[in-house]
Image (cartoon, rainbow, N blue to C red):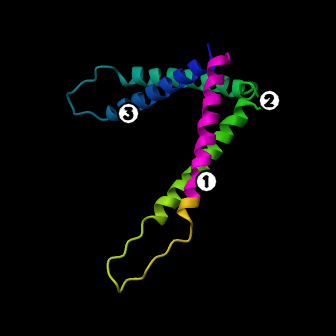
């Protein structure tokens, strides 16, 4: 199994866990006289089995990420993943700062006038550079995921 396939399976298991949890919570109380299509014990057992499978898969993925290198580099996948998260945080900060700086509202002449403290044009350029780095790194990670065996 390729790492990318394991990641897809992990996403599916995570969705199944969420759905099972919602079903268990929704059926924790029912109207007197009603019956369940599937017993709570079966739902909980299915949740526990899926949770165990999910946990084992996550451990395998994490172990592989900490030992495999990004395609054509000396960088470990785990390092690339953290770099991607760092770029996402930086992009998010730039984006929210630009949105906040552009939200200048003044309803009347007697209200306090708000002024920007950042150059949104320059910040947008920085955000675009980060976006490009993020896209390129994400592409390398995706490529590696399809080449590396779990």
Of labels 3 and 1, earlier in sequence is: 3
Q: Residue furthest right?
A: 74
Quadrant (top left, top right, bottom left, bottom right) of the C terminus = top right
Q: Magenta includes 124?
A: yes
Q: Residue furthest top?
A: 1
Question: How far apart in space, not on screen, are marks 2 and 3 (Cα)?
Answer: 43 Å
Q: Which residue is mark 3?
A: 22
Q: Which residue is mark 2?
A: 74
Q: Please provide percent x and percent y for residue 135.
A: 59, 37
Q: Please name the residue shown 37% across and 35% down the image.
A: 25
Is 87 in front, or is 125? 125
Q: Which residues are magenta?
A: 123-150
Question: How far apart in space, not on screen, are marks 2 and 1 (Cα)?
Answer: 27 Å
Is label 1 in a helix, a strand or a loop? helix
Is label 2 in a helix, a strand or a loop? loop
Q: Please name the residue shown 62% across and 35% down the image.
A: 136
Which quadrant of the structure image shows residue 125? Answer: bottom right
């Amino acid at each position: 199994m390729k790492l990318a396939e394991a990641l897809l399976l992990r996403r599916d298991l995570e969705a199944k866990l969420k759905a099972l949890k919602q079903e268990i919570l929704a059926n924790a109380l029912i109207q007197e006289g009603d019956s369940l299509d599937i017993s709570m014990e079966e739902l909980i057992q299915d949740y526990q089995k899926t949770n165990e499978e999910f946990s084992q898969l996550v451990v395998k993925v994490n172990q592989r990420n900490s030992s495999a290198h990004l395609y054509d580099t000396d960088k470990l996948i785990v390092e690339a993943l953290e770099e991607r998260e760092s770029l996402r945080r930086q992009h998010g900060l730039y984006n929210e700062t630009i949105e906040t700086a552009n939200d200048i509202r003044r309803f009347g002449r007697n209200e306090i006038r708000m002024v920007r403290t950042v150059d949104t044009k320059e910040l947008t350029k920085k955000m675009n550079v980060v976006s490009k780095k993020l896209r390129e790194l994400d592409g390398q990670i995706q490529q590696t995921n399809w080449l590396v065996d779990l």
